[in-house]
Image: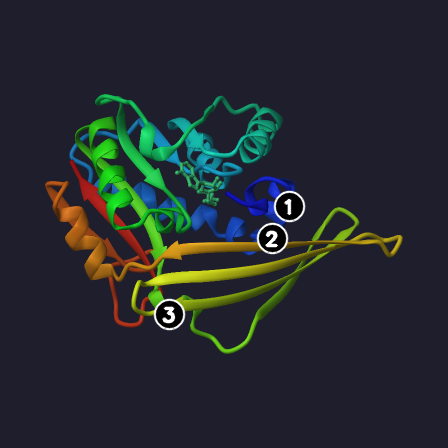
Amino acid sequence: MHELYTALAEYYDAIYRRRAERVGEEIDFVEGLFKNEAERRVRKILDLACGTGIPTLELARRGYQVTGLDLHDEMLAVARRKAEMEGLSVGFIQGNALEIDFEEDFDAVTMFFSSIMYFDDSAIQQLFNSVKRALRPGGLFIADFPCWFYGGEDGPIVWDERKGDERLIITDWREVEPAFQKLRFKRLVQILKPDGSVRAFMVNDELNVYTPREMRLLAEKHFRRVKIYGDLHELRPNDRRYWLVAVK
Ligand code: SAH
């Protein structure tokens, strides 16, 4: 796909430090969904597009039996190393979320942090089908995604982070193409070392924008019961992040 998940995999957790710090709250919310929305007890979870395992490991810390799946070996290498350092037992598999071949193996399938935006209208239907097959009856599919005007600010968004003695400067240009509902995303990552040397990466990405209503209507074609939540609570006006919760 691109450097964010390959050459920059080691920097992913630093780039998204603020989100990583919020993961405890996210998983509190997700555990609430397991309790209130699932129609079976959740023990065994498949975390699709698990990346460096930020949510995957948090689920494992809380005692769930978790399998993480991701397209990129570089991301999985970081996830495996973190799991090993913490002594957590998590299965990590390299694979494409669209090609999973599980049959009623999991009580819940998750896909965190906007990863569902990688799937366009036809791929998302294929995704829903394979997720549904992987779930046991009464199991849950959970995926979070942002508001469509997430990209709508003027000018680039710039922030900086640290990784050891390296300093990162991240510059994002985000633009929503309104007719085909694509979020075009350009990111410059500059890595500055104390000796003054700089490495720079330019990342280009294209994601699919879904409104909460579109996501609900699409998921309703595949799941028995679908609900859209807002940002870690019931959907409220002006929520900017949504959680798809679908029951098999
Ligand atoms: N869910 C993680 C990572 C999100 S980053 C988190 O919450 O931190 C998005 C991830 O999606 C990347 O690691 C990328 O490799 C993965 N990805 C993109 N398309 C995929 C696909 N078709 N199948 C599996 N993983 C995919």
Asked if residue 123 can be seen in this view, the reply is yes
Residue ID at (63%, 44%): 8
Q: Residue at x 49, y 61 (%)?
A: 185
Disc ID at residue 91? none
The residue lying furthest to the front in this view is: 179
Rendered-image quadrant of the C terminus: top left
In this picture, residue 193 sits left or right of residue 59 = right
- Position of residue 39 in the picture relative to residue 148 (left or right): left
Separation of residues labelled 2 and 3 (CA atoms): 21 Å
Q: Which residue is denoted by mark 1 in the rendering? A: 11
Q: Do tag 2 and tag 1 residues touch (Cβ < 8 Å)?
A: yes
Q: Is residue 135 visible?
A: no
Asked if residue 32 is positioned above or below residue 67 in the image, the reply reads: below
Kind of residue indicated by mark 1:
Tyr
Q: CA distance from mark 2 to mark 1?
A: 6 Å
Q: Element type at marker 2? A: helix
Say few, some or many: other residues with alpha carbon within 10 Å of mark 2 (under 14 / 14 to 19 / 20 or more): many
- Residue 204, percent from left and from top: 53, 55
User: Quick one: label 3, few (<14), some, or many (20+) residues within 10 Å?
Assistant: some
Rendering colour mode? rainbow
**x then y, percent, for residue 178:** 32, 70
Query: In what element is the residue under mark 1?
Result: helix
Q: Nearer the viewer, residue 65 or 50?
A: 50
Amino acid, disc 3:
Phe
Say whether marks 2 and 3 touch (CB < 8 Å): no
Which label sits in the foreground, 2 or 3?
A: 3
Image coords of residue 139 (percent x, y): 20, 33
The number of discs equals 3
> Between residues 161 and 9, which one lies in front from this camera angle?
9
Q: Which residue is mark 3?
A: 149
> Residue 15 got which mark?
2
